[in-house]
Amino acid sequence: LPDNAETIAVALRALAREGFFALPFGHMSARGAGQGSEAVLILRHLHSESFGIEDVTAADIIGIEADGSLPPGRDAPGERYIHTEIYARRPDANCVLHYHSTLTAAFGRAGRALVPQTPLGEVLKPVVPVHDFGGQVNSPARGAALAEALGQAAAITLPAHGAVVVGASVQEVAARALALEDCLAVELAAAQLGAQPVPAQPGTDAHTSAEVNDVLWHHLLRKHSVR
Ligand SMILES: [Zn+2]
C-alpha cells in the first residue's frame, strides 16, 4: 500500500518529539496514489500560524501537483520543489523529508560528506554527499540541482541549512533520518578525537536495512507514544 496522509502525520509528530524540528522548519512528503492535484502528499504551509509540527494530523497533509503547482486554496512550503524534483528523478523514492538540524547543517557547511561507520549507518551507504547550495530550494531549477547532487544517495546535506532524506517509504525515511543524526554525532566526536576520514564502502545488505528500518521506526513511535 502507498504511504498516506495518516502515515506522514504520524512520522512528523514522532520526529518532532525526537527533536527534528527544534527549529520549526521542515516538511515531509510521500508520492501520492492519485494524479494531478493529488500527485504528491505534503505537509501544508504552517508558518503563519501558532501551530507546531508536533501537532499535525492527516488533515494538514495536502495534495499538490507533480510539478509543484498548488491546487486552488492549498498552500505548501516554498521548498516543495525539493520533493517534486526528487520524485521526478528517483522512481525508487516514495517519501522525502527535509529538516534543519545543527549536525546536518554543520557537515554541509564544512563540505564534509558522510561515510557511514556505525551499525545503523548501513541504511545510508555508501555515502551522504554535500550539496553546493545552502539557500532556499524554492524553485524548480533549485530543486532539480539538489536532486542531481543527491543522485542515488539516501540523503544529502545542505551547507548551513539541513538535510534531505529519501526512501521507499515513510518508515524508511524516518529510520534513515535517525541513523543520519546518529552517524553524524559519532563522526563529529571521532573527528575531535583525531579519527581520519575513511573511503566509502560499497553495498547495502537489504536484509539488514529492512531490519534497521523496522526497529528504528517502532522505536521512534514507542519512545514518544505516537501512533
Ligand atoms: Zn529548509
Image (cartoon, rainbow, N blue to C red):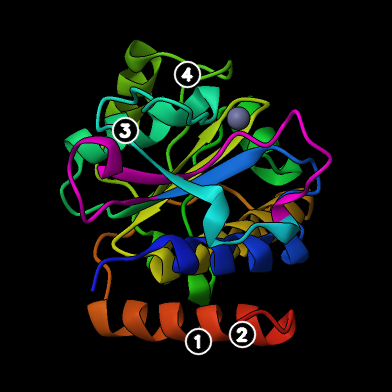
Q: Position of residue 16 (x, y in %)?
A: 72, 59
Q: Quadrant of residue 10?
A: bottom right
Ligand 1 position by quadrant: top right
Determine crowd level at label 1: few under 14, some 14-19, many 20+ residues with C-alpha closer than 10 A: few
Type of amino acid under label 4: Asp
Sequence order check: which comes first, mark 1 or mark 3? 3
Q: Mark 1 and mark 2 in contact? Answer it, CB < 8 Å.
A: yes
The residue that label 4 is drawn on is 132
**Camera sees residue 200:** no
Name the residue rendered at 73%, 49% in the picture.
21
Q: Position of residue 163 (x, y in %)?
A: 55, 40
Q: What residue span does the magenta drawing correspond to?
A: 30-53
Instruction: Give the number of the mark in front: 4 or 3.
Output: 3
**Camera sees residue 120:** yes
Name the residue rendered at 38%, 25% in the picture.
146
Residue 84: image tag: 3
Determine crowd level at label 3: few under 14, some 14-19, many 20+ residues with C-alpha closer than 10 A: many
Sequence order check: which comes first, mark 4 or mark 2? 4
Type of amino acid under label 2: His
